[in-house]
Image (cartoon, coloured by chain):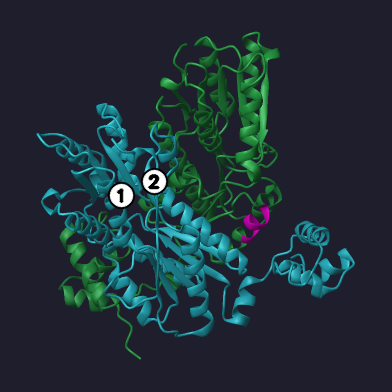
Chain colours: A cyan, B green
């Protein structure tokens, strides 16, 4: 068998010290003020010699793997893709690698993934939990696994979490519609027990109530599993009849995109006949003929905060839990212009 | 310390055999014809008792971890998010869990991830490689790691791969534009050495040449790192001057979305002044006022084929490499309607 290549071998070939090679191979060249060209040269030599850093040995020594696990609710949704990217960028800043999995909104899969990642010695987890996974999250706590919940806190579970003020953001969106002269504002949400969606619904209800329109409440729910059909039915009901809705508030971007497809098909004009506002952003909102007013979540800040909270837990052990709630911002565009 | 919960404990509480519990806990209930209700009951009891399957022991016994690693080029791009989801769904069918990472088009990060996943005993890798990672891929081969390249094969590396006929699909798209009466067809692509983009460019060039328009070739390149600026400049150049382009072919969905934003800003009418066609699909294409003609990659088939090839390698050891090339389909919509 070929002798294993060591840092020393690389150092000799590059004509530099072993310490310097070590800095580069652990991605700490900036801290050690190693020049870019030199770092590149060292990496090239390491590659040529087929150097394999002994992560496992390193992690046994430090008791840490310098890896965090991320579980998102559905990786095919660009919102979670962006969160994943942000967490990666932020983790990279702290020399952590991120490996992740997607529960696809399925509680069994979520359990499998948590086990798969923990069995692979990640130092901690960031979880955007699937509906019904409270018990799995409680177990993480019992096992003293460092973790942070993101996007969807469980109100009954005492855990560190990053979320946004969902009720407040929904309230602002509906208030904006009412102040723009709309009176019959419908809402389409997911049929789910998840807290963040319940909060968005309550923000909608509160706004109607504050403007004396509690009787105009019209919420329709769509199932994940029957998204297209349920949204079409909901829009038919909301925009039909004697008193059709003159505005729609979608609780997520996936709901809005499916809804806008159907609204276009029906030939309903936005914003003239129907104002539209959605939670979350989407590239599709920019390309719609009347760019869609939306609630922008502070994804970058959320990612930074999640990584910070997790690393603090990893370093300091049993820290008291911390729930961070950030504000979202309403981005007003043409889809809610006054009639 | 609490005694570890065993399959037997669960079986006793459920009043069934240990074998039956084992089937359910390894997700093989269908094979064993366990009823849905019974499987649910057993899972509930397992959860209540806080049962922890001993994956590590299991993987030591079988020499396998029943986990595959997936490395995508940029998880914030919905195209890769969809691929990831498809691979997960397919892997799940075979009782495999997928953990993944994103190289973010960065060759160093790609190397870190490959090591991170291999150190965590995945049984094999599916890789959508970053530019410049040929050497890392060659090393996988030297180390006899089962792996499959996806979306972006390296022509100089002998490896199993799933790709599509990029040149052929680009050719069809440009031919469609020419047959619809367009004569000055521009193309915007990434500035990259990646083979699949070179193939798309050659399909474009070949189509122009076959229709006697080789002199009308106008390709502009945009850098990943300066996407917005480079695309704006490219569109200014292509649509300006005495003989402005009457059609644009975008080599990827990200390029097209950024391009369409600017085209809308400029007030250029699609399809009247400018026909538009793009590689890849996007929800944004559906919501554009003239739904965008695009090249649909067979993502589901690609994911299925990648998982199949990988599992064959994992089971049969050093199998001969197999390169699967699938056809893409041109979906003609309003953005390329005749003038």
Q: Is B12 covered by the magenta stretch?
A: no
Q: Is residue B118 above or below residue B336?
A: below
Q: Is residue B35 visible?
A: no
SS at mark 2 in the image: loop
Q: Is B110 covered by the magenta stretch?
A: yes
Q: Are marks 2 and 1 on the same chain?
A: yes
Whole-percent x, y for residue B113 in the image: 59, 59
Check disc 2 and report the residue beneath it.
Answer: A332
Q: Is residue A160 visible?
A: yes
Check disc 1 and report the residue beneath it.
Answer: A176
Could you tell me which quadrant the C terminus of chain A lies in?
top left
Q: Mark number for residue B57?
A: none
- Please identify the residue farthest to the bottom as the structure is shown: B1
Q: Nearer the viewer, residue A12 or B144?
A: A12
Please tell me which residue is depicted at 15% across the width and 73% down the height of the picture: B15
Quarter of the image for residue A226 reads top left
Going by the image, does A49 lie left or right of B154? right
Q: Earlier in the sequence, mark 2 or mark 1?
A: 1
Quarter of the image for residue B150 reads top right
Quarter of the image for residue B281 reads top left
Residue span colored magenta: B107-112
- Asked whether the beta carbons under mark 2 and mark 1 sit within 8 Å of each other, the answer is yes
Could you tell me which quadrant the N terminus of chain A lies in?
bottom right
Is the residue marked by circle 2 packed among few (<14), some (14-19), or many (20+) residues within 10 Å? some
Q: Nearer the viewer, residue A191 or B73?
A: A191
Q: Nearer the viewer, residue B163 or B78?
A: B78
SS at mark 1 in the image: helix
Separation (CA) of disc 2 from disc 1: 9 Å
């Amino acid at each position: 068998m070929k002798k294993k290549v060591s840092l020393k071998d690389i150092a000799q070939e590059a004509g530099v010290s072993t310490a310097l090679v070590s800095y580069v191979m652990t991605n700490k060249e900036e801290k050690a003020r190693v020049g870019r060209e030199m770092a590149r040269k060292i990496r090239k030599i390491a590659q040529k010699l087929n150097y394999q850093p002994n992560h496992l040995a390193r992690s046994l020594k430090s008791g840490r793997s310098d890896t965090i696990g991320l579980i998102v609710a559905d990786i095919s949704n660009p919102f979670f893709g962006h969160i994943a990217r942000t967490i990666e960028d932020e983790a990279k800043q702290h020399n952590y690698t991120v490996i992740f999995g997607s529960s696809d909104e399925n509680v069994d899969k979520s359990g499998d993934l948590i086990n798969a990642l923990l069995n692979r010695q990640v130092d901690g987890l960031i979880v955007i939990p699937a509906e019904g996974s409270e018990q799995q999250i409680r177990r993480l706590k019992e096992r003293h696994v460092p973790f942070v919940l993101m996007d969807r806190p469980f109100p009954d579970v005492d855990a560190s979490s990053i979320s946004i003020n969902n009720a407040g953001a929904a309230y602002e969106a509906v208030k904006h519609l009412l102040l723009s002269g709309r009176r019959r504002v419908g809402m389409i949400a997911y049929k789910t027990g998840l807290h963040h969606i319940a909060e968005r619904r309550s923000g909608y209800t509160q706004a109607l109530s504050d403007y004396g329109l509690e009787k105009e409440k019209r919420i329709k729910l769509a199932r994940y599993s029957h998204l297209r059909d349920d949204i079409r039915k909901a829009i038919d009901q909301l925009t039909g009849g004697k008193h059709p809705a003159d505005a729609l508030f979608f609780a997520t971007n996936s709901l809005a995109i499916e809804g806008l497809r159907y609204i276009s098909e029906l030939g309903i004009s936005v914003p003239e006949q129907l104002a539209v506002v959605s939670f979350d952003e989407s590239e599709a909102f920019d390309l719609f003929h009347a760019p869609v007013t939306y609630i922008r979540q502070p994804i970058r800040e959320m990612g930074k905060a999640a990584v910070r909270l997790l690393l603090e837990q990893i370093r300091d052990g049993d820290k008291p839990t911390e729930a961070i709630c950030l504000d979202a911002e309403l981005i007003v565009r043409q889809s809610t212009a006054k009639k």
